[in-house]
Image: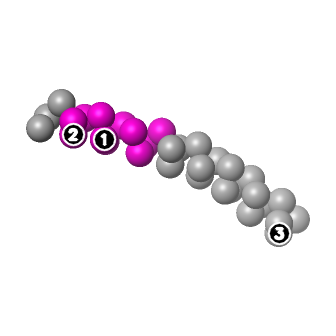
Amino acid sequence: MSPRSSGFVNSVRSKPAVNASPAPVTITTPTV
């Protein structure tokens, strides 16, 4: 259960992390 939960949390965290990365970068590009 421990390793399964970790993998699930990492998968879910990885998705928003990748989406959040390009989000602020794109906003900063046009702002500059």
Q: Seen in the image, is 31 located left or right of residue 5?
A: left
Q: Residue at x 39, y 39 (%)?
A: 22
Which residue lies under the disc numbered 3?
2
Marked residue nearer the N-terminal end (1 or 3): 3
- Residue at the image point whose x is 58% and y is 43% from the top: 15
Tell me the mark number nearer the camera, choosing from 2 and 3: 2
Q: Residues within 10 Å of mark 2 (few under 14, many from 20)?
A: few
**Mark 1: few, some, or many residues within 10 Å (few <14, many ≥20)?**
few
Work out which quarter of the rendered image holds the C terminus and state it: top left
Q: Percent from the top left, x then y, of residue 27?
A: 25, 35
Type of residue at label 2? Thr
Residue at 30% x, 34% y: name it: 26
Q: Amino acid at mark 3?
A: Ser
Query: Distance of mark 1 from mark 2, alpha carbons?
Result: 5 Å
Instruction: Kindly give the residue lying farthest to the bottom in the view shown.
Output: 2
**Callout 1: SS:** helix
- 1 and 2 marks in contact (CB < 8 Å): yes
Q: Secondary structure at mark 2?
A: helix
Alpha carbons under labels 2 and 3: distance apart: 39 Å
The answer to whether mark 2 and mark 3 are in CB contact below 8 A is: no
Q: Determine which residue is flagged by label 2.
A: 28
Q: Quick one: label 2 or label 3, which is nearer the N terminus?
A: 3
Q: Which residue is mark 1?
A: 25
Q: In the image as oriented, which residue stretches furthest toward the left? A: 32
Range of residues picked out in magenta: 19-29
Q: Which mark is residue 17?
A: none
Decide whether residue 15 is among the magenta residues.
no
Quarter containing the N terminus: bottom right
Main SS of the magenta part reads: helix
Q: Amino acid at mark 1?
A: Val
